[in-house]
Image: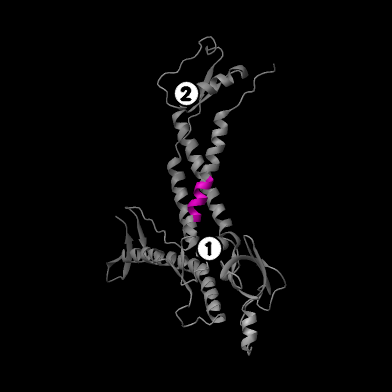
Amino acid sequence: MGKKSRHNYQFKDNLLINDLTFYDYLNRFKKVALSMFEWVNLPKSMNAQFLEKCLYYNGMASLLKDKNYGFINTQCCSNGELNIYGLPNNLNCYSFSYNSSRKLYTGLIEGLTEPQKEIREYYECILVQNNWDRTPTAGSMELFALRLYNADRTADVNINAQKTPVMVLVDEEQKLLMENLYSQYDGNKPFIFGDKKQLGSDVLRAIKTDAPFIADKIIDYKKEIWNEASTFLGINNIIVDKKERLITDEANSNNELINLNLQSFLAPRQEACTQFNEKFGFTGTDKEISVRVRSDLHNIVKNAQSSVTPINKNLNTEVIQNG
């Protein structure tokens, strides 16, 4: 029989926690991003949730009319040359068990007869863009999640260092023994038993590492990353400590950036709704579709604005006070 393999199970557990931490933050961001917009009056054969997922992961999607399914929304990708506005002339519209090559609707061709319009219904599609560059949201969210994961795990290591600020020096033969004993200590066992012959002072030494406590600074760093991610998504994220004040000009500047980021997602979606309504004659009817920011986001902005109160009428200076 060969030597028994030695496995560092603590290391494997840490790898698992690393993955869980990263994907936990990524899923949090994804849930927020997929809940920002509400598609209004979509035909029943369409699916707003799938539409937002396509935009989140691929940066673009399509709205079209199919002879078998009626009005549907699918994933899409460029399938040809660009037109005069830098948009693809042709789109490959695809989904699970579905594929259709379509011309991009631009509204540039006028004066069509009714038969021609009916034919065009089934070979044109509407391009929905996540933003004007048609880039997915997922890539940016992965970067933010990675930074938060690094900060979180660094804080965990720093906090553990306060509990065990020592470096244990042992022979290679005692390494597995010490790992098992440390796992008991890390598990907060009240009593730990060891062989005094194996753990004598001549074979075991400990060096204090005296790791400084920086977890509080890392938590502040995490807040900055979270706020930056929220600003990117167009979500109000003003958080002011009780002892701090934020000048109104600073708050307005932050709100303007948030609004512009939000509009970068909203405007392309609204453009797609306008084109869809124009193409299928829904403009001004009860079938007209639209997209809007969910009302709860508006309420957050209203609450932030309502906290702005004047402190000196003569100087016309305002601050935001929290607490």
Q: Position of residue 107 (x, y in %)?
A: 61, 82
User: As displayed, is residue 59 above or below residue 274?
Assistant: above
User: What's drawn in magenta, residue-wise?
Assistant: 22-30
User: Which of 303/53 is in front?
Assistant: 53
**Mark on residue 113?**
none
Image-based side of 307 in relation to 202, left or right: left
SS for callout 1:
helix
User: As displayed, is residue 106 above or below residue 192?
Assistant: below
Q: Which residue is mark 1?
A: 52
User: Which of 17/240 is in front?
Assistant: 17
Q: Which residue is mark 2?
A: 184
Magenta portion: prevailing SS class: helix
| Amino acid type at mark 1 | Glu
Image-based side of 245 in relation to 289, left or right: left
Q: Residue at x 54, y 64 (%)?
A: 51
Q: Is residue 28 magenta?
A: yes
Mark 2 or 1, nearer chain start: 1
Classed neighbour count for the residue bearing mark 2: other residues with Cα under 10 Å, few (<14), some (14–19), many (≥20):
some
Q: How is the image coloured?
A: one colour
Q: Is residue 20 magenta?
A: no
Classed neighbour count for the residue bearing mark 1: other residues with Cα under 10 Å, few (<14), some (14–19), many (≥20):
many
Image-based side of 51 in relation to 244, left or right: right
* Quadrant in the picture for residue 163: top left
| Amino acid type at mark 2 | Gln
